[in-house]
Image: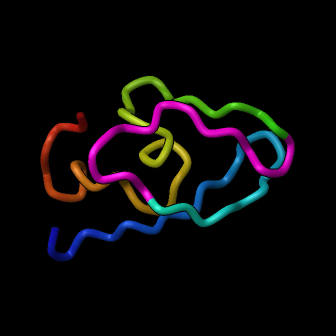
Amino acid sequence: MNDVILQSTLTCPSCAASHVETMPTDACQYFYKCTGCGTVLRPKTGDCCVYCSYGTVACPPIQLGNECC
């Protein structure tokens, strides 16, 4: 996976807490529990995962120009 960024900073829309996470390369992540307020994040309509919705970097499949999962 050359040129694929695996670190993304997720920002909670409820409390604005940010946390750097390593994205999985073999699965989509549909849920993420905020480390600040405990809100469970889910992808926005039209996005494939929480990284595409709330992260600073899209998930690896999207970065490679593929469909996600």
Position of residue 30 measured from the top left corner of the image (x, y, whole percent) = 47, 31
Quadrant position of the C terminus in the picture: top left
Magenta includes 66?
no
> Hey, which residue is sitting farthest bottom in the picture?
3
29 relative position to 32: left or right:
left
> Hey, which residue is sitting farthest top in the picture?
45
Q: Quadrant of residue 41?
A: top right
Magenta includes 26?
yes
> Hey, which residue is sitting farthest front in the picture?
26
Answer above or below: position of 6 versus 13: below
Q: Residue at x 45, y 38 (%)?
A: 29
Q: Colour scheme used in the picture?
A: rainbow
Q: Which residues are magenta?
A: 23-37
Answer above or below: position of 3 versus 54: below
Answer above or below: position of 43 versus 65: above
Q: Nearer the viewer, residue 55 or 19?
A: 19
Q: Main secondary structure of the magenta part?
A: loop
Position of residue 15 measured from the top left corner of the image (x, y, whole percent) = 83, 47
